[in-house]
Image (cartoon, coloured by chain):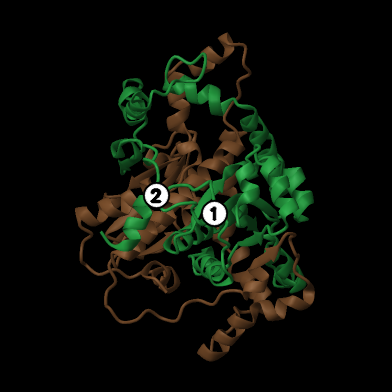
Chain colours: A green, B brown
Amino acid sequence: MNSTLELLNNRRSLRAYSDQPITAGEKAAILQGAFRAPTAGAMQLYTILEVADPAIKERLAETCDHQPFIAKAPLVLLFLADYQRWWDVFNFSGAPERARELGRPTRPLQVGDLMLACCDTLIAAQSAVIAAESLGIGSCYIGDILENYEIHRELFDLPPYVIPLTLVCFGHPVSQRPAANPSPRFPAEYMVHTDRYRRLAAEEVEPLFRPWIERMQASGGKFVEGAENYGQSNYLRKFIAEFSFEMSRSAAAMLKNWE
Amino acid sequence: MNSTLELLNNRRSLRAYSDQPITAGEKAAILQGAFRAPTAGAMQLYTILEVADPAIKERLAETCDHQPFIAKAPLVLLFLADYQRWWDVFNFSGAPERARELGRPTRPLQVGDLMLACCDTLIAAQSAVIAAESLGIGSCYIGDILENYEIHRELFDLPPYVIPLTLVCFGHPVSQRPAANPSPRFPAEYMVHTDRYRRLAAEEVEPLFRPWIERMQASGGKFVEGAENYGQSNYLRKFIAEFSFEMSRSAAAMLKNWE
């Protein structure tokens, strides 16, 4: 196994960071990893916002479902899906007017543009994460940045066609001891289908969760209170948790500008 | 620079593949790279559909904006954003009923869930791409899979909460000669902001595109017919191209199930 495959296979999310700062050279390498990532039509439909101000990090630690470790990360990068830059370029360049002069149809920005921008943004983010990992710098994605859109829009002065899609915390690990066991994954047969989508059958729920149940039994873990099985436990703990309702509301608000 | 950073910095999209097949071991390593990718709440909100049937590859080469090289790729992976698996698990597990018994509020699937699934899906896709690259296997993302949703839904038998988000073609390069110059990127100052989003000003359009203009001049390239500048050229060639109207329509159709 080559060193890149080893890195991909051994990566864990890191939520506790040492005091060791991330040097300018390390940060440049992480950002460069993102910049060279593939991008639709080479349009780079994203912006990376470095959250440097400790007060803003503290605020994010609250608005992203109360996770104090965010404020302690030496490097916090907000990956914004960004069509605003190109939209402004089009308008500054007189592009819609030129199209009309040429008798071509024009169109507004739409959700398809947003989805393409989301692809660019995540591809860049994961490239940055892997670049960091290769330097011994751990990271953690914060999906909760999808919550509280209005607060983040105000905090970061986001124009309409910029969406806070994912937040990544970076830092050196506190110690070199081996990371905990990786979280289980579903058996490959459920994750990879051939030629047609194969929908899960009721009797497959048990084998699907077998790696998880085995881990739970080994660690003495339990389902959340009130849950009788893994599906119920996840549903109660995550899908209908307060943060999930907020994420649903917030994401719907983000999409309003794109319709 | 370590080998992973070199790989990230030197990667180019590859659209011409040798006849050398991708071995079972190589495919397993690519998929394993995806499986170990970080995922929101360890939910793995994606499915990888391997397009193995040559007739389906031919069809995709047409439906994805007429790109014949897709049919010639030895390995074609469709990355599906997938909340259907979990939604079915919740229902098979009696989760909504249990929540109601416990007096907890329930909710339908919504766009926030889709956005989280999109994050998982692209993070996995880029991990697969990097795993492949480390094995000397090139790749190309096909964003055009966002078009023609209804055709792809039928072709792959996709249930409502599964979205074809990105397609990736993989294969060995035809020769070992160095790849062409990489496509330019915007200067870093426009891509990375600190603490607040900095919206582009009109006078920044020229420096923004300087790397592109320099490349165009060096290669003797031209703007598309009718365009007077870079913004107009991109707008005419891409933003109001037929495929863009189709992508907008198709993506809006995909989102209907999530509202």
Chain label for disc 1: A
Residue B148, how many percent across, how many down? 49, 49
Q: Residue furthest top?
A: B101
Q: Which residue is mark 1?
A: A18
Which residue is at the front of the view, B208 or B220?
A: B208
Q: CA distance from mark 2 to mark 1?
A: 13 Å
Q: Does label 2 or label 1 sit earlier along the sequence?
A: 1
Classify the position of the N terminus of chain A by image quarter. bottom left
Q: Secondary structure at mark 2?
A: loop
| Residue A209 higher or lower than B47, as above or below | above
| Residue A38 higher or lower than A184, as above or below | below
Identity, as a three-letter code, of the amino acid under mark 1: Ser
User: For mark 1, does the 10 Å Cα neighbourhood hold few (<14), some (14 to 19), or many (20 or more) residues?
Assistant: few
Residue A76, how many percent across, how many down? 62, 56
Which residue is at the front of the view, B3 or B200?
A: B3
Q: Which residue is mark 2?
A: A177
| Residue A96 higher or lower than A193, as above or below | below
Q: Secondary structure at mark 1?
A: loop
Q: Is residue B52 visible?
A: yes
Residue at coordinates 32% horizontally, 42% vertically from top-left?
A192
Task: Report the side of A66 relative to A29 (left or right).
Answer: right
Q: Is residue B167 visible?
A: no
Which residue is at the front of the view, B16 or A55?
A: A55
Residue B193 placement: quadrant: bottom right
